[in-house]
Image (cartoon, rainbow, N blue to C red):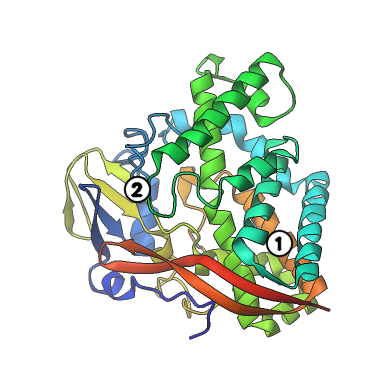
Amino acid sequence: MKKSAHADPFEKARLDKGFGEMNDQDDPVVMLLRHKDVRKCAHNWKTFQSGAAPGRIVIPSEVPIRDTRQIPFELDPPLHGEYRALMEAWFKRPIEKNYQEKLADQINASIDQALEMGSLELIKEFSLPLQSRALTLLLNTPYSESDTWISWGTHVFRSEDDPLDSSKANILYDYIDEQIEKASQNPGEDLYSVLLASEAQGRKLSKEEVKGVMILTFAGGRDTVINAITNTIAYFADHPQSLARLREEPEIIGKAVEEFIRYFSPLTHMGRVATEDTQVCEHAVKSDSRISLCWASANRDASVFENPNEIILDRKINPHVGFGFSHHKCLGATHAREILKILIATLAEKVQSIEIEDYQENIEHWGEFQRKVGYDSIRVKFQGR
């Protein structure tokens, strides 16, 4: 098996019964594995809500480390739609030419530096800095702020020996509180200031609501984007012919991005809380218990995707759920897509080959399932054209 391959640990359970079960901090979760069930339940917000206790729909649950509600992520319609509408235009900015030019400058600089270094640890020395620097564009904050974010490491809620590190989480919370206070005293054109000036439910957003948006922005697009960047580069190391093809056929880069998101599924799953006794896959689910929408399993469902365990760069039909589904589709998806599109185009232009020198896989444990989501570390060597 190639070093970049991601096996599908859910296949047997998906075919046999359609669900799996796991225990998360004594709060059990029924994992939905089939594409149709994941989409159906993601759309059914009345039965499977996001607006439960803050942190409970995340797996592992973040209830022990936060009481701030992430907005609009932890809201249900119609309130979700009202808050989301405040942010849609801002988070669509990555399609603007000026934004793309600035992002391209950042990515070009990152790849030029990687070529000069030759051998580098890809996550710490490339993917994390690239993600953090690109985030300055999304937030419209000074580039220098990225140095602070890089210093936090790959995860903002997790340390090497603790999957939910409250002291580390507090570093993020304190930082956001400080930035909100600065923006309230001296408003600018950054996201903090825009949110503080916005209105919902006939009033200005509170600082706590702004904090909820910003926690989501920092945490939701961090390790997911880092995993997407890292896994994509690892794939090109194993498949130099694919990089060469994208050099010759740049018109399929957009399709390739969607295929990488489907195959790698940077976020394994997301939870919902049942509002009533119900059933999924003929399995009883009690009111106030949790289900998970397993994006990673749904994206390998052979009833939807032909040859689901292969990367097909120009896959014609690709209804993946790698960015979620229905009203809760990822707000940061446009930003993530643009990062990957420009990254791939620039790699194709400047890089001849990539060699994986050493690596340690990042394996997630979800009940009976063990899933590779990316790498804890991976050393690669870039060879320029």
- Up the image or down, 71 lies above or below 8; here it is above
Q: Amino acid at mark 1?
A: Lys
**Where's the C terminus, which quadrant?**
bottom right
- Image location (x, y in percent) of residue 39: 40, 55
Front position in the image: 259 or 305: 259
Dot 1 alpha-carbon crowd within 10 angstroms: few under 14, some 14 to 19, many 20 or more: some
Q: Amino acid at mark 2?
A: Gly
Front position in the image: 187 or 277: 187
Question: At 56% from the left edge and 77% from the top edge, which residue is drawn?
Answer: 358
Front position in the image: 358 or 41: 358
- Image location (x, y in percent) of residue 146: 68, 43
Residue 313 seen by the camera: no
Q: Which mark is residue 210?
A: none
Residue 189 seen by the camera: yes
Q: Which residue does the numbered mark 2 point to in the structure image?
A: 271
Secondary structure under tag 1 reads helix
- Up the image or down, 155 lies above or below 275; here it is below
Front position in the image: 28 or 81: 28
**Horizontal side, residue 59 vs residue 310: left or right:** left
**Horizontal side, residue 333 vs residue 97: left or right:** left
Q: Which residue does the numbered mark 1 point to in the structure image?
A: 341
Q: CA distance from mark 1 to mark 2?
A: 29 Å
- Image location (x, y in percent) of residue 166: 40, 38
- Image location (x, y in percent) of residue 210: 55, 26
Dot 2 alpha-carbon crowd within 10 angstroms: few under 14, some 14 to 19, many 20 or more: many
Picture quadrant where residue 276 is located: top left
